[in-house]
Amino acid sequence: MNRKEVLTILDQYGYEAKKSLGQNFLCNDDVIGEILDLAQLDKTMTCLEIGPGLGALSERAVLQAGKFLAVEIDTRFEDRLKKVIRDNGGEVIFMDYLSFSKQDLPDPSFDPQVILSNLPYYVMTPIMLKVLKDFPNCRKMIFMVEEEALDRIFARPGTKQYGPLSVLTDLFGKKRKCLTVDSGSFYPSPKTTSAVIEIEAGTVSGMWDPAWIAFVESAFALRRKTLVNSLSSGGEYSKDSILTALKEMKLNETVRSEQLLPQDLVRLYEILHERKDKELWHTNV
């Protein structure tokens, strides 16, 4: 889909981009081709696209995948996406992905192996974290993000940008920046440059339950406080249990979350939950 085709579609349906939804429609066939090359879809695979917009990726991805589902917040695109997706054997749900649950799936067994999305900056983090919660068995995620957001995704311990997103994507698997996309590849053209990133699942992806993700978010909830204060503020863990776990790990009680490696947080979570399980068992007996 090129710029001329985007303008024709917008005119045909009477659409215009909504700034409130961060809509900038991809209109560069070369970039679309590179994203699909990264996805490596075939008829044995399932694919989810979040925010298909006018269907620039969808119209080709739906033909390549065995099962294809898109979730779109903007109901104005219903006629267009039904033609592009449903008429070619895929499915589309019109709702905010942040309100989406697995009960909304037209096929309860649907479990995407590949997830595609062009993510507006203002919802990038919550959508990426929700994807990890919803589909821990996904093998590959390909996201278009604003280039400045890469600092948060690829941040290292000890930096201001280091937080739940960098920790969780680090642990989920191998991540890399694949290409830079200039503003002219979109209509309307944004003021920022974008980037396409790929995250491939590693061997520990099966541990991605909501409790684990909530733990990491809680660890960074009060960044100016110690890890003990940040974790205990949510009420899930007592200060005593956290201090005992830190002592077992030979970590100082004044340590802050941004000082810990992702693997340190995994170990802390395991110790705390092992202790919680033991306490629950003693309470029950």
Image (tube, rainbow, N blue to C red):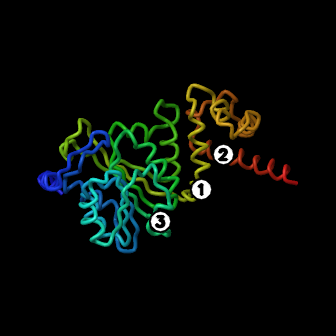
Q: In terms of secondary structure, where does tag 2 sit?
A: helix
Q: Residue at 51% across / 37% down in the picture?
A: 163
Please indicate whether residue 275 sits to the left or right of residue 93 in the image: right
**Which comes sooner in the sequence, label 2 or label 1?**
1
Q: In terms of secondary structure, where does tag 3 sit?
A: loop
Where is residue 225 drawn, in percent x and y? 61, 26
Q: Mark 1 points at which residue?
A: 207
Q: From mark 3 to mark 1, how far is it between C-alphas? A: 16 Å
**Image vertical order of residue 6 relative to residue 120, above or below:** below
Q: In which quarter of the image is the N terminus?
A: bottom left
Q: Residues within 10 Å of mark 1 (few under 14, many from 20)?
A: some
Where is residue 168 drawn, in percent x and y? 52, 46
**Image vertical order of residue 138 relative to residue 228, above or below:** below
> What's the mark number on residue 269?
2
Q: Which amino acid does label 3 sit on?
A: Asp
Q: How many labels does the image show?
A: 3
Q: Residues within 10 Å of mark 2 (few under 14, many from 20)?
A: some
Where is residue 206 drawn, in percent x and y? 57, 59
Q: Which amino acid does label 2 sit on?
A: Tyr
Please indicate whether residue 82 sits to the left or right of residue 235 in the image: left
**Image vertical order of residue 217 relative to residue 84, above or below:** above
Q: From mark 3 to mark 2, how far is it between C-alphas? A: 27 Å
> What's the mark number on residue 111?
3
Choose between 76 and 45: the one closer to the eye.
76
**Which comes sooner in the sequence, label 3 or label 1?**
3
Choose between 76 and 67: the one closer to the eye.
76
